[in-house]
Image (cartoon, coloured by chain):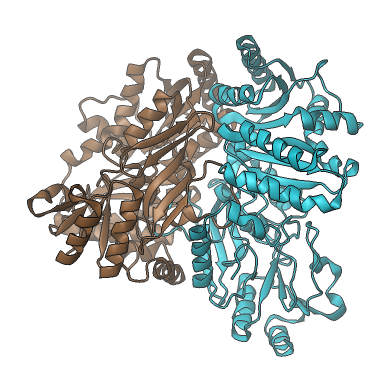
Chain colours: A cyan, B brown
Amino acid sequence: MQELIEALTQRLGPDAVLTGADVTDRYLTDWSSVIGPRPAVVVRPDCTAQVSETMRACSQFGQPVVVQGGLTGLSGGAVPKAGELVLSLERMNRIEEVDTASMTLTAQAGTPLQKVQDAADASGFLFPLDLGARGSCNIGGNISTNAGGNQVLRFGMARNLVLGLEAVLADGTVISAMSKVLKNNSGYDLKQLFIGTEGTLGIVTRAVLRLFPKPKSCCTALVAAQSFADTIRLLQYLGSEFGGSLGKFEVMWASYFDFIITHVNTTRSPFDKQYPVYVLAEIDGASQDADQERFAEALAQAMAEGFVSDAAIAQSERERHSFWSIRDGVAEIGAHTKHSANFDVSVPISRMAEFLARVDRDLNAEFGKATALYFGHIGDNNLHLCAWTGNKSDTQRLYEIVYQATGEFGGSISAEHGIGVLKIPYLKHSRSEAELALMRRLKAALDPKGLLNPGRVVEC
Amino acid sequence: MQELIEALTQRLGPDAVLTGADVTDRYLTDWSSVIGPRPAVVVRPDCTAQVSETMRACSQFGQPVVVQGGLTGLSGGAVPKAGELVLSLERMNRIEEVDTASMTLTAQAGTPLQKVQDAADASGFLFPLDLGARGSCNIGGNISTNAGGNQVLRFGMARNLVLGLEAVLADGTVISAMSKVLKNNSGYDLKQLFIGTEGTLGIVTRAVLRLFPKPKSCCTALVAAQSFADTIRLLQYLGSEFGGSLGKFEVMWASYFDFIITHVNTTRSPFDKQYPVYVLAEIDGASQDADQERFAEALAQAMAEGFVSDAAIAQSERERHSFWSIRDGVAEIGAHTKHSANFDVSVPISRMAEFLARVDRDLNAEFGKATALYFGHIGDNNLHLCAWTGNKSDTQRLYEIVYQATGEFGGSISAEHGIGVLKIPYLKHSRSEAELALMRRLKAALDPKGLLNPGRVVEC
């Protein structure tokens, strides 16, 4: 590899090439539990031409590459494997333009999500992609993994928020499709090749993102219901009453809600009784008072019709935070459990109740004493599930049982977090052999030497 | 080809194979002006397995195939070329399921769009894809061309409305990815390969479509403004006031508006003066009276702030139709012009005024007496443009002038209607050589023998 390192140092300059002690622990891991070996070199291009140069050299030397952004992934996709060169986008962190008339923002891939959100906000607009890792994750990683997050119901996933994209192929070819237009049927929509493919088909270097007018107000309600079926009726009812202004619809089953209220000191239920299921719903609007009144009327109507049992509308920002603290309590679960298996699956809504009953039955049959908490972005079919027995040796079987059921119910074993390396063994539950073969065919067409993020998502 | 026809007749049954006089004129053309030679055979599979069987046989015999749906395309992509076998999806026209809890509808590719809309409506939901050809076009064609239409601003293009997809590759492989879930990051999103690629990478056979709760009301306003910049301010203002409930935002420049009012007898302006530009805007809602009041207040505020000059809110369904008849008057232009060139381009909003000035200047410099009407789905960056001199010999230059400018302004030469065969010569204005090469690479990877819709979109 020494010859390649020398060539890159010469072509890109010494700032772009880290070796020896300069390769710190930062480059060894992401937010998954996977830790890789220390790479011989970290290359940090500062522009697209340097990314292209790097890949041309790697292609020439047959050098495998792992691409790193903000290193907040949960599936281990950015963790180096032995012999890989690390290509980090950390120096490509500039916002190039905010076009207020077109409502677009152009950024380099290594720009932190929060920096994008802040730049949009400072220009009077909303960039709606939002997730917990916002301060650390990069927009390029958000795009490469098709990130979801808190506002998918109204605005869609990262895929929906990208108008134009630039990417570098394994051989160094630059594909620049930096369109600012929403409607573009001029030939194949090539950006789709690089969104959600986790850097295995190309390296995202720049993007044109969609901005939106900022909502002026936000009304939040915590709602109690007797059954999951009633929450689905509520979802459709609010969709009809508030159309595209229904921003969030989070469901928490009693298993989750009661666990959080019991274990997380800062949370309390606004209800004086317990219920089988709870919904946290938000409406975006233009007038706090008027929207709150409409929201209250709509929920009163739902109570009169029997599919809502109780409801509390946040009357202050403090109360809104109090409601959200129950949903955000997920971050505290780890402190009260041992060896939990955490899931990010999607299941068709029509089969979700049956799916949960099946998982309960299978867990009880296998372990007797397993605990499982259910909650999720149900407006988007996305179920999070946290299960444990307390024994480390059971974790593997917990994963197998839940993924097996997910596949049988027509679900996705990874709704938001991607496949990386950790979920490859389970991909077969969600994808057929013909689909996996087509993924490999695509990979071979775009990266015939298998140099880009090898062994992530698809096995070569 | 006789041997192939016999093999297909034997495997698929005689109903599936038309030859001789049974191959009617219907199979020779679409809504473009292109007419193809009469094909030797039309194969009409009635299920995915038969499509697969057909492609396996064609692959074996090296037989090129053109895929036909509702034959309403405007770019000539479905018109047969000499020697091609026609594969028509016309017998695959069944709606397989409406899943009301998941809000999905599953249909075969040959199902007319209107049949899909009606089935959604009968189940209490909205399928928001809508375009003029709704009675004839098929959902498979809508998906293959990533159709746009009237409701893109709120609901996105066809790409956004497809959750699951099944397609048959050139070699007969069935890729079945009939997911019902919104969030699915389990490996490559293969359906993107078949959406908007005009049948060149695979034949769409079935799809799972997204349904939405029906809006309960719709408020329509016709608005007059002094400049295009003011209409953009209005677009952003309404987006902030009404969020995701802003359903339509159509802009008509005076050139178009005045032409229609003058030439189409059934139209009249609600205003007593003429203005430089007009907007037709619609808000989806839940209560006609309350929404109308909010809409009126918002427009009054815009008038007070000076970016709206006059506004009329439709007070009845009759009045709503009267407003829309001006926009729909586009269908009548042909009766009052000769040899017009019709465009469906996208241009970044921030550059649109400058783009129109450039086109005006170029047309005047070349022809002196050219007429150009401007209108479009400006909320989506989509500009329609109709230009003519009256001389047939000028049409070609009209196309060249406008597409040249579109490329230079970072626009798309085809916003909605695709490339087919007619727009291939102009694709270079919107796409770089590297992009075109990647399209060819994809085509070669998925259809190495070049049998599927050859010569459409990409030149092999």
The x and y percentages for residue B98 are 44, 31
Quarter-of-image position of residue A257: top right
Give the farthest residue toward the top.
Answer: A304
Quadrant in which the C terminus of chain A appears: bottom right
Count of marks overlaid on the render = 0
From the viewer's side, name the closer residue of A346 and B38.
A346
How far across and how far down the image is residue A459, in percent? 61, 67
Locate residue A85, reporting x and y percent. Answer: 71, 76
Foreground of the two, A31 or B254: A31
* Viewer-side residue, A137 vs B296: A137
Q: Quadrant of residue B120?
A: top left
Q: Quadrant of the N terminus of chain A?
A: bottom right
Q: Is residue A333 above or below residue B339?
A: above
Residue placed at 52% from the left, 72% from the top?
A: A444
- In this rendering, does residue B423 appear at all? no
Taking the view exactly as shown, the residue that stands out farthest to the right is A265
Query: Percent from the top left, x then y, of residue B179?
Result: 51, 45
Q: Residue furthest front?
A: A365
One can see residue A404 in this view: yes
Q: At 11% from the left edge and 49% from the top edge, which residue is drawn?
A: B22
> Going by the picture, which residue comes out furthest to the left?
B21
Classify A360 as above or below B366: above
